[in-house]
Amino acid sequence: MKPQTEKVALITGSTRGIGLAVAQRLGQDGYKIILNSSQKEAVLEATQSMGKQIGAERVFGVSADVSNEQSVEDMFTRIKDRFGRLDVLVNNAGISPRLNGEKPTVETTPSEQWLQTIAINLTGAFYTCKYALPLMKPLAWGRIINMSSQAGRMFTGFASAHYSASKAGIIGFSRVLAGEVGEFGITVNCVSPGKIQTSMAATYAKSKEVEEIYRSRSPLKRVGDVQDVVGAVSFLASTDADFMTGSVLDLTGGFYMP
């Protein structure tokens, strides 16, 4: 794959975990990187750190709440003013709320927690895609990569209903969008990780127990690492994936086989 010296990539929720690892990989691939989080200090810190790695002129940090349409619109205004284009959008921002460290059931899930999860994980992707398309269409090329989850593909026993619903929704949303924008040279695909070792996953009180169950049921006998995800995103963002759209890449170590 040739270095993408002129192309610009936005990764939401990219100051830690999978999002930061994806941003670092795309930076290594040669893209100009836009980091995002709702936390201003986290954006500033990550932007300064990555700037030292790939050059400050190639990194742009924008604090925005993806669940708020005005905040997203303002973010894209800044992106347009800075770069005048957007080639790759990775919708990674997401939450998986707990109750006292445990997975809530449908009965125990607070309504506000349900609404917040759908707002960030699903509606946030809708907002970013809505405002990204006007920057991609004039290029007659674009890559939208939406982060789903194994929890959106099957009953795992580990994930809550609000998280699973949001990630299943991402897949349906992505397929409709892929059908709408293919004629403009824009592809839309999903990455669907299984159990990945991240700080968010560690908030689950039974995370160690889940890891052992996952290892026992996985043909590869291990849980995933963030580096298992970044290669798939790098591929989908590249010209090597020109003929893929509306697809879901399952990164589960064989735990889930459709």
Image (cartoon, rainbow, N blue to C red):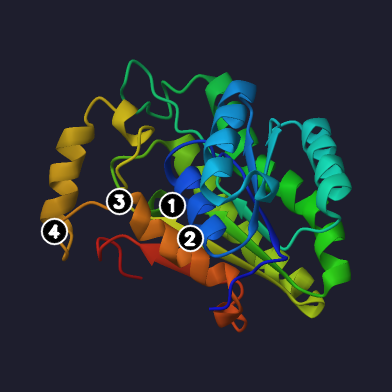
Quarter of the figure with residue 30: bottom right
How much space separates mark 1 and mark 4, taking CA atoms? 19 Å
Please tell me which of labels 1 and 4 falls first in the chain: 1
Residue type, label 1: Ser
Say the numbered circle drawn on residue 203. none
The quadrant of the rendering that contains the C terminus is bottom left
How much space separates mark 3 and mark 4, taking CA atoms? 13 Å
The residue to which callout 3 is attached is: 225
On the picture, is 211 further left or further right than 59?
A: left
Say the numbered circle drawn on residue 221. 4
Q: Residue 114, how many percent across, how many down?
A: 55, 28
In this view, the mark in front (2 or 3): 3
On the picture, is 254 further left or further right than 17?
A: left
Say the numbered circle drawn on residue 149. 1
Residue type, label 3: Asp
Please tell me which of labels 1 and 2 falls first in the chain: 1
How much space separates mark 2 and mark 3, taking CA atoms? 14 Å
Q: Residue at x 35, y 56 (%)?
A: 227
Q: Residue 19, how many percent across, how many down?
A: 50, 45
Please tell me which residue lies in front, 132 or 51: 51
Q: Name the secondary structure under disc 3.
A: loop
Q: Residue at x 25, y 24 (%)?
A: 205
Q: Residue at x 41, y 20 (%)?
A: 108
Q: Name the secondary structure under disc 1.
A: loop
Q: Name the secondary structure under disc 2.
A: strand
The residue to which callout 2 is attached is: 191
The correct choice, above or below, for 226 with respect to 172 in the image is above
On the picture, is 77 further left or further right than 236?
A: right
